[in-house]
Each structure stands twice: as structure tokens, then as C-alpha cells.
Amino acid sequence: MDKKQLKIAMLSIHSNPIGELGTNDTGGMSVYIRELARELGRRGHWIDIYTRLRNGRHQPVIDLFENVRLVHIGIPNNGNLSRLALYPYLPDFFKSMEDFRFHEGIEYDLIHSHYWLSGRLGSWAQEHWDRPHMVMFHTLGEVKNRTAVGRPEPELRIAAEKELAKTCHRILAPTEQEKDSLVRYYGVCGEKIGVVPCGVNLDLFQPQEKLATRKQLGFDQDDIILLYVGRFEPLKGIDRLLEAIPHLKNHQRIRLVLVGGDGDEAPESQFLQQKVIDLGIEDKVLFAGRIEQKYLPPYYNSADVLVISSHYESFGLVGLEALACGRPVVSTPVGAMKHLIQQSQAGHVVNDTLPRSLAKGIQSIITNSAPQLADEIRESVLAYSWSNVAAAMLREYETTIRHQSFANDQIVSAQASCG
Ligand code: UDP
């Protein structure tokens, strides 16, 4: 057990850490919160994760892991509201959170909020509880808008992120690239930002025999399998990946397996299905639907390559998961991919999301006559265990708590010194 037991309030209002991964509101952030909390709890710290109540589907309080509770707050009829539509209800969430805290008589040592909506809630907690507040944005509205893909993020989000960046005690970014964006587009002083990478469950994601996993999943042994795993949304560039297929040489044997999405009827799935028809590649693309994370390892292991075609990622957990399984990754230069692929020497970073560029990257992997051994690839990401992430996070928590007495002065002077 670590020296002092900390009590942490983790805020994840819009996305439930036990929600259905791969659907619109539930992706890498949920994995991050769940895994980090589990590891902190295991080390003897006490974590309450606050999330929104979804139409009474869950018990108000769930004992998730050792020392970790999931606390559902808010009003039941907001369960299906979109992220942005939650904004006017934030005061209700705060009241509900306060009611729970009073009832339980808890004083937290630190607030750790995830995404700007929870950050807003966290800033009220920061003020009322007089406790240090750390924020992880997970994605940044300003950077999303610069990709000019999908619906633009509203000014409300950008303004809230800027305000939060100014007033919170510490910001955590998963990569140096994300840190640079915070400095460049949000005017944050670099010293206020800690960089802690994301992790991977190394027990779950392990190399397995390719042919055996193909047999298990009913995939052809002779096909060249490209894999996509993730939510279906425009920012992921799945349309570009589909457009890349006809550019591949020997594409008769290519199969693209798409894992994730909100079901056949969801608008983004329909758009992609139509795209497949328009490109005449129906026989090459399999929409596998969302797969529970515990069943994902055979998918990674059956693939010749995982492709990340995103316009923007803050980190890109699926890349790390594929590498932990010993599979190579072709990726656009997003999130941690450049660094991870360089480190593992297993894959290819393409310059942009153009279908030709993606095809060229994929081609270089599938025609590689001397592929790297799975164990060697995995070796390169062993440092990314959740245990190491939790250790780094605890250092951040402890330093931030220690500095709280003069944190407000620090914010003022830091802002002043950064202009
Ligand atoms: N995931 C899953 N089942 C699916 C699709 C995705 O469990 O059908 C998980 C995947 O294992 C990964 C996460 O969802 O841990 C996606 O995280 P990533 O950082 O790649 O993308 P994000 O959702 O943060 O944009």
C-alpha cells in the first residue's frame, strides 16, 4: 500500500466507465478512468467516480473494484441526452453530488475531472470544497475544430475549456503533442501541465497464435486482414480507410474488419455502409459491431495490421492494445502513435489521412517479407502498464495536494508569467 491513503473524487459525467465501449459516448476515456481507478484502489486509495444516472438502469452506488465506487448522480430523465444537452443540467449534477457527499460525510483530498463538462462541475467543487482540482480534457475542442471534420465544437466548449485551463490547479495531458496544443491554443503555461501517458491492460492484451484466432473468429486463413477498432465518428476517418482499399495492390485478398459503432441503424454506420456500396467493396468489408473489450484480443491477433485513420486522437489506446498483442500498426500522425510506432519499430506512420497515403502505409506492412516477432513488438510497450500510469498519477496528485496552500497564487503568477 502507498504511504497515505488519498480520497479522490473522479468526475466523469457524460461517459460511464462501465458503459458499452465502442459506442458514441464510451471510448478511451472510460477505459482510462476504469483502469486508473482500479489500480489506485488496489494501492489502498479511495476513489468515488461520479457519473450520470442513465434512466435508472444502474444502482445509485456500485462497488466497482476494491476501494472504488461508482456513484450515479443527476436526474433520471437526462439519461439519453447528448453531451452538450447536459450542460444546462450541470448545476443539478453538482447538487446531487453535494447531497451524496454530505450524506456520506466525505472530505476528498483532490478532484480529478475528465472532459470539459466534468471539468465545469469540478471547478464548482474546487471552489466549494477548497480542494485541488486536476483536469484531463481527453480531447480539445480547439484542436478538433482545426481538423474541420464533422460538426464544429461550439464556442461554449472552447470558452469553458479556456476558463478551466486558467482556474484549475493542474492539467494532465497524455502526450507532449497535446501539451503543446494546450500551450499554443489555450495559452496555458507549460509548467502547469503534467504529461502522463495512457496505459494498456497487459494481462488482457497478449500475443496469440494468428491462425488459431482466425479459426476462432471464422476468418479465412489466407486473407490479409486489416483491422479498425473504435467508435464510429467522422473524426476517426473510417471513410478514408474505406477509400484506401481500392488503392491496395492484390486487394482481392484484403478484408477490412470494422469493430465498434452504435449498430446498423446509427447514422454514421449507415453512411459508412453506403460508402462501402459506392466503392464496390462489399465483399471486402465486415462490420463486426461493438465487441466487449474482454473479447477483443483475438481480433487484434487475427489481424495483419491495425489501422488508425483518425484526423485527431489525444492518445489512441487501440494502437497500444494492438502493439501489446504484438501486431503492427499503421497510423496517421495522431496522439501517441508516432512515438509508439517509432519505439516498437512495428508499423508505419503516414503523413495524412489521404486514402493513397493510408494505402501506401498499409502496403508497406503487408508486403514486408520479414515481419517483426510478436514478442518483440510487445516488449516495446511493456512500460505502459496501468500500474506505471497509476504510479505517475500518484506523483502528480501528491505534488498538487502539497502545493494547494499556495496554488491560487501560483495560478495567478503562472498566468501572468505566461502572458
Ligand atoms: N473498444 C472496445 N470495443 C469496441 C470498440 C472499442 O472495447 O467495440 C475499446 C478499445 O479497446 C479501446 C477504446 O474502446 O480501449 C477506444 O479508445 P481509443 O483511445 O482508441 O479511442 P477513443 O474512444 O478515446 O476516441
Image: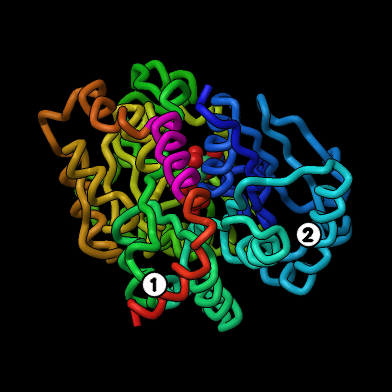
Q: Secondary structure at mark 2?
A: loop
Q: As shown in the figure, which amino acid type bears the numbered disc 1?
A: Ala
Relative placement, left or right, of 208 versus 374 is right
Give the residue displayed 81% in from the left and 52% down from the top. 73
Q: Is residue 392 magenta?
A: yes
Give the residue displayed 18% in from the left and 54% down from the top. 360
How far across and down, in percent of the image, does residue 393 sit? 45, 42
Q: Is ligand 1 closer than 8 angstroms to the Cβ of mark 1?
A: no
How far across and down, in percent of the image, does residue 177 sit? 30, 61
Tell me: residue 405, above or below residue 3.
Answer: below
Q: Is ligand 1 closer than 8 angstroms to the Cβ of mark 2?
A: no
Q: Disc 2 designates what residue?
A: 80
> Dot 2, how many residues are within 10 Å of its Cα: few (below 14), some (14-19), or many (20+)?
few
Relative placement, left or right, of 398 versus 373 is right
Q: Disc 1 designates what residue?
A: 414
Q: Is residue 208 magenta?
A: no
How far across and down, in percent of the image, does residue 51 sit? 72, 50
| Numbered circle sitting on residue 13 | none
Locate the C terminus and report the quarter of the image it occupies.
bottom left
Q: Main secondary structure of the magenta part?
A: helix
Between 352 and 131, which is closer to the camera in this rendering?
A: 131
Tell me: residue 338, above or below residue 391.
Answer: below
Between 329 and 211, which is closer to the camera in this rendering?
A: 329
Report how far apart the C-alphas of labels 2 and 1 lie in the structure: 40 Å
> Dot 1, how many residues are within 10 Å of its Cα: few (below 14), some (14-19), or many (20+)?
some
Between 68 and 1, which is closer to the camera in this rendering?
A: 1
Q: Confirm whether residue 317 shows in the render.
A: yes
Residue found farthest to the front: 405
Tag 2–tag 1 contact (CB < 8 Å): no
The stretch in magenta equals 385-399
